[in-house]
């Protein structure tokens, strides 16, 4: 069904960014506009979600050129769910940034660039054209480069070099894949490609092309052995930026993988084995990397890598229950990972450092905030009935029926190591006594009340979302079930786009 | 023509990857640019090059009567060139700033220990 409403979330962020450009240097105005824009974006995303949840898949042909000739935007369950989650995370980060980002950064256009980034994310989720997906990826990476380097400290710029080099390389691989795909099929529309790929005579060439996409998206989503840029750059930018990156940017890679490998290339047994091996190694290397880290944000960076493996593994099994698990994990992961980096920023405000060894005694000084953080950490580990628990049941259950015992082992080791590092962090940061001689200062206490609320409320918002996902798992399972069905049976998607 | 392009693409990709694997930041930048150009020519080649047949319909007809050059790859390349232009410009400025800060061209020296900021 054609509905131009699909573009509303994209346009809201576009106009928010443009209006903010008019108020260059008026940082207070920008803060207000950003929160308002994010709020409007969230309401638009909720409405879009409600439309797609109850109704058919929506499409929109740009310039009224019929698919497959024009660029088409498609809102199916997977896209709209991710747009909704992105909007929630965007609202939280936007509120946090109002006090969490220093004035100097705000004066050089932090907020407009942030909204351009969210625009790119929404566009990438909603587009139905593979070259358009590439263009939105570029919108995302150029915005993320600016956010990463804004401020220009030494460590930040050094992290940005690695980040930039790997992301441009990933885009080049992705573009190469698109070029070959166009060469063998003559189409760029994803639904049209889905129809044309099975008719290509030389299926080996299709397999080789798909490997370009695995590499390109693999670098974006930080899959073993392509993840090394992530832990060496994500700890450098301000926490609000790291939250956007950690929660959303790697997940775009996962989304693109889900989309391309369910719609265009149906995974062959070889591709499944390859993805499964990558998933297992990603989980293990991410988990073992996290054990030795004492800086909170470096630890969380490795946990991102570790948990990416769960989703890739779910895709590799490519059965309904496993995909449900992977999608559920994706939903849980976006909210929790965004929250983790915001929490890292809050801890830095409370204690003046992110080094676990140096700081301590948070529970004694701030029991309420500590309990809030504890809730998020528990759901990250997956203590039932919180949100991290349910997807693992689906993943492990289907891994048993498909005899993927190595994956079960990896999931269990990954979860166990997550539990271990989080328990270690809890005892170091919250229960250990603060060293007497330390020169660290509490920057949180002297803040005025409204600034304190602005710092804590986004964490409360995201924690409440996590709690909702965990306690109302039935609703989320229903959503994941719909998405998994759409991924396995792509005919409704193709019919919605091409009308046949 | 096609054969020459195939060889050129191979050379550009090989040279690009080789340059990226070097330790110098300038060579990293050159490598990225070479790879980008290789990709652009690859798209151009895979659009089935047709010589001297512009995709313009004759005045007297309403549809194409002959084979014509596919205009889409060129639109794609144009987009890709513009994007890589922007990215390269950013990369040059970034690498220059890093060079000014750490005073070396060696990528292995980019390991300043943790500096903390919000």
Image (tube, coloured by chain):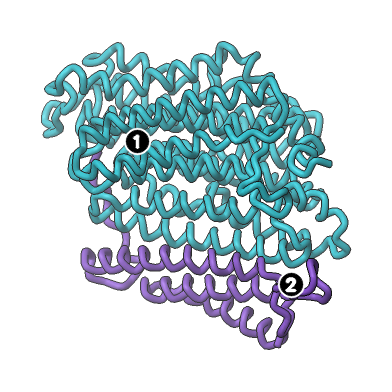
Checking the image for residue B57, the label placed there is 2
Lateral position of residue A80 relative to residue A109, left or right: right
Query: Which element carries disc 1, helix, strand or loop?
Result: helix
Foreground pick, A186 / A398: A186
* Screen quadrant of the N terminus of chain A: top right
Q: Which quadrant does the C terminus of chain A fall into?
A: top right
- The residue at the point 52 percent across, 31 percent down is A333
Q: Position of residue A174 (x, y in %)?
A: 60, 59
Image coordinates for residue A189, horizontal then vertical, percent: 70, 52
Other-residue count near label 1 (Cα within 10 Å), few / some / many at <14 / 14–19 / ≥20 = many
Looking at the image, residue A367 lies above or below residue A346: above
Same subunit, labels 2 and 1: the answer reads: no
In this rendering, which labeled residue sits more in front, label 2 or label 1? 2
Q: Examine the rendering and report whether any part of residue A328 can be seen.
A: yes
Q: x, y percentage for residue A3?
A: 64, 33
Q: Residue at x 48, y 19 (%)?
A: A465
Quadrant in the picture for residue A283? top right
- Chain B appears what colour? purple
């Amino acid at each position: 069904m054609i509905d131009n409403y699909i573009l509303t979330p994209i346009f809201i962020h576009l106009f928010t960014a443009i209006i903010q450009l008019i108020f260059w240097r008026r940082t207070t105005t920008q803060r207000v506009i950003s929160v308002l824009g994010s709020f409007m974006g969230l309401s638009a995303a909720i409405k879009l979600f409600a439309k797609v949840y109850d109704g058919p898949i929506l499409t929109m042909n740009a310039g009224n050129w019929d698919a497959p000739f024009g660029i088409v935007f498609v809102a199916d369950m997977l896209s709209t769910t991710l747009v909704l989650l992105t909007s929630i995370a965007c609202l939280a980060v936007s509120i946090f940034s109002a006090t969490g980002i220093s004035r100097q950064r705000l004066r050089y256009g932090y907020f407009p660039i942030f909204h351009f980034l969210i625009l790119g994310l929404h566009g990438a989720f909603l587009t139905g054209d593979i070259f358009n997906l590439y263009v939105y990826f570029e919108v995302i990476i150029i915005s993320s480069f600016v956010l990463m380097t804004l401020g220009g400290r030494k460590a930040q710029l050094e992290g940005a070099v690695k980040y930039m080099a790997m992301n441009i390389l990933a885009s080049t691989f992705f573009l190469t894949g698109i070029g070959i795909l166009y060469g063998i099929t003559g189409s760029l529309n994803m639904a049209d490609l889905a129809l044309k790929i099975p008719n290509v005579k030389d299926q080996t060439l299709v397999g080789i092309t798909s490997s370009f996409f695995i590499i390109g998206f693999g670098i974006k989503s930080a899959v073993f052995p392509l993840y090394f840029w992530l832990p060496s750059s994500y700890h450098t930018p301000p926490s609000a930026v790291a939250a956007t990156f950690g929660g959303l940017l790697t997940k775009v890679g996962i989304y693109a993988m889900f989309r391309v490998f369910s719609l265009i290339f149906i995974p062959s047994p070889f591709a499944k084995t390859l993805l499964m091996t990558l998933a297992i190694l990603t989980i293990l290397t991410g988990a073992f990397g996290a054990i030795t880290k004492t800086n909170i944000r470096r630890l969380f960076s490795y946990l991102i890598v570790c948990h990416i493996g769960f989703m890739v593994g779910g895709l590799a099994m490519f059965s309904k229950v496993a995909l449900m698990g992977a999608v559920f994990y994706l939903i849980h992961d976006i909210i929790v990972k965004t929250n983790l980096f915001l929490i890292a920023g809050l801890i830095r405000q409370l204690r003046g450092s992110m080094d676990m060894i140096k700081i301590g005694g948070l529970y004694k000084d701030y029991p309420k905030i500590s309990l809030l953080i504890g809730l998020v950490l528990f759901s990250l580990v997956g203590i039932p009935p919180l949100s991290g628990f349910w997807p693992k049941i689906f993943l492990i259950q289907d891994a048993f029926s498909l005899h993927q015992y190595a994956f079960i082992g990896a999931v269990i080791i990954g979860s166990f190591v997550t539990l271990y590092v989080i328990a270690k962090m809890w005892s170091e940061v919250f229960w250990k006594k603060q060293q007497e001689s330390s020169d660290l200062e509490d920057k949180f206490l002297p803040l005025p009340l409204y600034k304190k609320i602005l710092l804590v409320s986004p964490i409360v918002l995201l924690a409440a979302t996590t709690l909702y996902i965990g306690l109302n798992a039935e609703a989320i399972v229903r959503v994941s079930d719909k998405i998994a069905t759409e991924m396995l049976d792509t005919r409704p998607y193709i019919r919605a786009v091409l009308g046949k | 023509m096609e054969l020459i392009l195939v060889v050129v693409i191979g050379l550009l990709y090989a040279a690009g990857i080789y340059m990226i694997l070097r330790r110098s930041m300038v060579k990293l930048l050159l490598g990225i640019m070479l790879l980008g150009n290789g990709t652009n020519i690859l798209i151009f080649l895979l659009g089935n090059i047709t010589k001297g047949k512009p995709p313009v319909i004759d005045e007297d007809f309403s549809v194409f009567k002959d084979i014509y050059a596919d205009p889409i790859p060129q639109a794609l390349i144009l987009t890709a060139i513009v994007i890589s232009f922007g990215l390269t410009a950013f990369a040059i400025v970034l690498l220059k700033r890093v060079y000014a800060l750490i005073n070396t061209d060696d990528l292995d020296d980019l390991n300043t220990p943790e500096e903390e900021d919000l």
